[in-house]
Image (cartoon, helix red, strand yellow):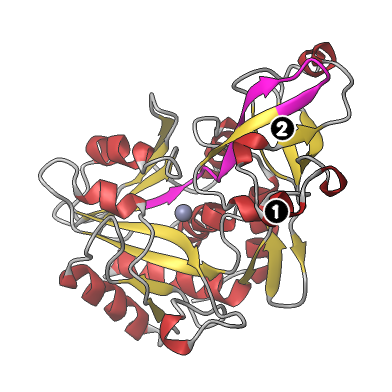
């Protein structure tokens, strides 16, 4: 099976540069709905929560109904206060490490999808006591400077309490294999689903494919729950981005996944224990084309698979994830070859 690396990189960059904070994912869902129009699905629509759902009917009426899920949201921030002198206070949407925040650039999005860039700061070090300098303030204590002198100037930009923003970086290619950018968790999964549909274009497979581009994963696996109820799958696969910690000072037993070693198969995380039947099906899919894969070793994090598995009378669900370093930070780093292998793996998973 051939994959188109150039197209994978182009879509990865486009998806990474979009803004889709939890509950405010429209820029990403609009993009995906447009892409689906060219991908030979039988039906595509947006549900009341904002999930993008699609169905590609199979040729066998007794075939499986397989759900492929990837979440569209990324960790972000919501404005909680604007000071009279134009500084913006925020709260995180999703898990963000406060140590990674100071001096990063954020971009806020207004209702017209215009962007405003600012820098995160706190009391300058020259004006703090030595013991204060050792501590990292909470994110809610930090402020964002967007260069406005007054609250009115901020409001003029159509930013208000409840407006959202995310890290500011344009996705860049560092070398033949490596991309650096934001929101790879989980625009990578969205890209993989688009590529899987592209490679199945014009082809009828026995199983019916159900697609969910899910909203609000980062704040509690929310969108997937409603979508799984609607789509009524027999089995499900969450296609994710997972933490790679193949970096200095991590001892080998503690390395969960490594970049460049293939997509990671989850056996368990904090949201589910993956049924043996699903793990075996994923491994069988890999075996067909001798696709490189690895286990996700740490039992950490939660995914939409956990939420989907508890829908209706229970849905056996698994996770395939592309390893990414510095997940949930201002810039993540991944290997394109892992995306290519994930696409091949998911295509086989759907066909068998
Ligand atoms: Zn994720």
Q: Is mark 1 within 8 Å of ligand 1?
A: no
Residue 296, image x, y percentages:
39, 74
Which residues lie in the magenta part?
69-88
Q: Nearer the viewer, mark 2 or mark 1?
A: 1
Q: In which quarter of the image is residue 112?
A: top right
Q: In which quarter of the image is residue 331?
A: bottom right
> Is residue 256 rendered to the left or right of residue 5?
left
- The residue wearing badge 1 is 131
Q: Is mark 2 within 8 Å of ligand 1?
A: no
Using a 10 Å C-alpha cutoff, classify the residue at mark 2 as few (fewer than 14 neighbours), some (14 to 19) or many (20 or more).
Answer: many
The front one of 147 and 45 is 147
Q: Which of marks 2 and 1 is nearer the N terminus?
A: 2
- The residue wearing badge 2 is 108
Q: Is residue 77 magenta?
A: yes
Residue 228, image x, y percentages:
27, 42
Q: Distance from label 2 to label 1 (Cα)?
A: 32 Å
The front one of 339 and 108 is 108
- Disc sitting over residue 254 in the figure: none
Residue 64 vertical position relative to residue 347 in the rendered view, above or below: above
Q: Tell me which secondary structure the magenta stretch mostly adopts.
A: strand
Circles 2, 1 touching at the beta carbon (< 8 Å): no
């Amino acid at each position: 099976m051939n994959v188109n690396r150039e197209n994978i990189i182009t879509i990865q960059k486009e998806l990474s540069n979009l803004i889709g904070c939890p509950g405010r994912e429209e820029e990403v869902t609009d993009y995906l709905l447009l892409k689906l129009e060219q991908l030979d699905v039988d039906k595509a629509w947006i549900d009341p929560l904002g999930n993008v759902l699609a169905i590609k009917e199979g040729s066998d009426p007794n075939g499986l109904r397989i759900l492929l899920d990837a979440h569209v949201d990324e960790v972000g921030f919501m404005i909680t206060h604007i000071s009279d002198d134009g500084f913006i206070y925020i709260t995180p949407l999703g898990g963000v490490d406060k140590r990674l925040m100071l001096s990063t650039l954020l971009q806020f999005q207004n209702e017209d999808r215009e962007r405003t860039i600012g820098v995160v700061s706190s009391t300058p070090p020259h004006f703090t006591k030595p013991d204060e300098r050792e501590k990292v303030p909470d994110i809610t204590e930090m402020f964002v400077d967007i260069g406005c002198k007054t609250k009115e100037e901020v409001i003029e930009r159509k930013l208000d309490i409840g407006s959202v923003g995310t890290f500011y970086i344009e996705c860049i290619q560092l070398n033949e294999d490596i991309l650096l950018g934001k929101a790879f968790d989980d625009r990578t999964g969205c890209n993989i689903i688009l590529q899987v549909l592209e490679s199945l274009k014009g082809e009828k497979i026995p199983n019916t494919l159900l697609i969910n581009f899910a909203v609000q994963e980062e704040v509690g696996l929310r969108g997937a729950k409603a979508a799984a109820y609607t789509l009524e799958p027999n089995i499900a696969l969450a296609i994710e981005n997972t933490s790679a910690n193949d970096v200095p000072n991590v001892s080998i037993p503690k390395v969960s996944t490594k970049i460049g070693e293939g997509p990671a198969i989850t056996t368990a995380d904090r949201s589910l224990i993956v049924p043996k039947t699903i793990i075996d099906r994923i491994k069988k899919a890999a075996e067909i084309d001798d696709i490189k894969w690895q286990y996700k070793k740490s039992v950490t994090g939660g995914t939409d698979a956990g939420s989907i598995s508890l829908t209706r009378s229970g849905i056996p669900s698994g996770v395939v994830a592309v390893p990414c370093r510095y997940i949930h930070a201002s810039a993540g780093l991944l290997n394109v070859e892992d995306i290519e292998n994930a696409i091949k793996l998911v295509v086989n998973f759907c066909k068998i």
